[in-house]
Amino acid sequence: MEKLRAGAEKLGLRLGEKELALFQTYYEEIIDWNQRMNLTAITDYEKVQINHFLDSLTVVSVWKPPANNPNPKVIDIGAGAGVPGIPLKIVFPEIQLALLDSTTKKTAFLNHLKQKLGLDDIEVVTGRAEEIAHQSQYRERFDLVLARAVAPMTTLVELTLPFCKVGGKLVAHKKGELEPEITDAKRAISILGGKLEEVKPINLTEFPDRRYLVVIDKIASTPRQYSRRSGMPVKNPLG
Ligand code: SAM
């Protein structure tokens, strides 16, 4: 885990033996399960460290558990193999993490991983974000909502902002040409109670491509009708 250790240090994170051992186990479990299901196309030891683990940890450049809220609630929407949620939980074990994915096989992996890593306070939820967002125990309950590689921005905000408390944040990992996506999403962000706070470029030599974190503050409650029914945010994006 040397690549990860060195990269994390650039983000101001000192990973100790315990954290590095957890990341090593996480890597081994991804590789093992990937033989039986399609978890990720990235399997090379160094690439997993950079493109999955370090990329997830870049969230610390825009968010850390606040001193006045020792156990913040965090949800990863479309968590897949657990990124970015699990790496963040390894470095901040105090967070209460929910991992949501619509694919049963992926959530089976996440449940297994949770046992294997022995991490407390992880809830794995199987279901579509559009539907789970209307359940009161998930609606506007989270201090931080994460999403990586799930959908274009306009669709993404409809899938994620309903989970975010007023006063909380959405942090979305994005790559490549972002300007048109952000422009298209402006109206949806406003309808859903969000306000674009920052587009933070990630300038680490580990990532030669253009990577950003899009930070959206939740400033008002999301109207009850959102998310619309399953599939609508993709088929007919707001805006
Ligand atoms: N976040 C992970 C990553 O960065 O590697 C996984 C990304 S993968 C490309 C997208 C994931 O989002 C898939 O696991 C898929 O099942 C899930 N997903 C897509 N649409 C969803 C929805 N509407 N509700 C819940 N999960 C969804």
Image (spheres, helix red, strand yellow):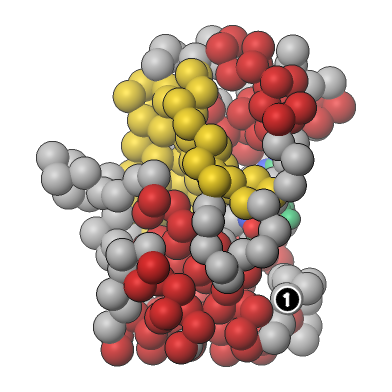
Q: Is residue 79 left or right of residue 168?
A: right
- Disc 1 marks a residue whose amino acid type is Ile
Residue in view at x 51 percent, y 23 percent:
196
Respond yes or no on whether mark 1 lies under 8 Å from ligand 1: no
Q: Is residue 189 left or right of residue 44?
A: left
Q: Nearer the viewer, residue 107 or 87?
A: 87
Q: Is residue 60 left or right of residue 170?
A: left
Q: Is residue 175 above or below residue 46?
A: above
Q: Position of residue 100 (x, y in %)?
A: 56, 50
Q: Position of residue 67 (x, y in %)?
A: 14, 45
Q: Nearer the viewer, residue 51 or 12?
A: 12
Q: Identify residue for label 1.
A: 42
Specify the quadrant that holds the C terminus.
top right
Residue in view at x 69 percent, y 86 percent:
44
Q: Is residue 13 above or below residue 216?
A: below
Which image quadrant is residue 108 in?
Answer: bottom right
Mark 1: secondary structure: loop
Q: Nearer the viewer, residue 143 or 131?
A: 143
Which image quadrant is residue 69 in?
Answer: top left
Number of numbered tags placed on the structure image:
1
Residue 102 appears in view: no
The residue at the far right in this view is 235
Residue in view at x 47 percent, y 79 percent:
4
Q: Position of residue 199 (x, y in %)?
A: 53, 35
Crowdedness near tag 1: few (<14), some (14–19) or many (≥20) residues, C-alpha within 10 Å? some
Q: Position of residue 198 (x, y in %)?
A: 48, 31
Q: Is residue 110 above or below residue 145?
A: below
Residue 157 appears in view: yes
Q: Is residue 199 left or right of residue 182?
A: left
Residue in view at x 53 percent, y 53 percent:
202
Which image quadrant is residue 233 in?
Answer: top right
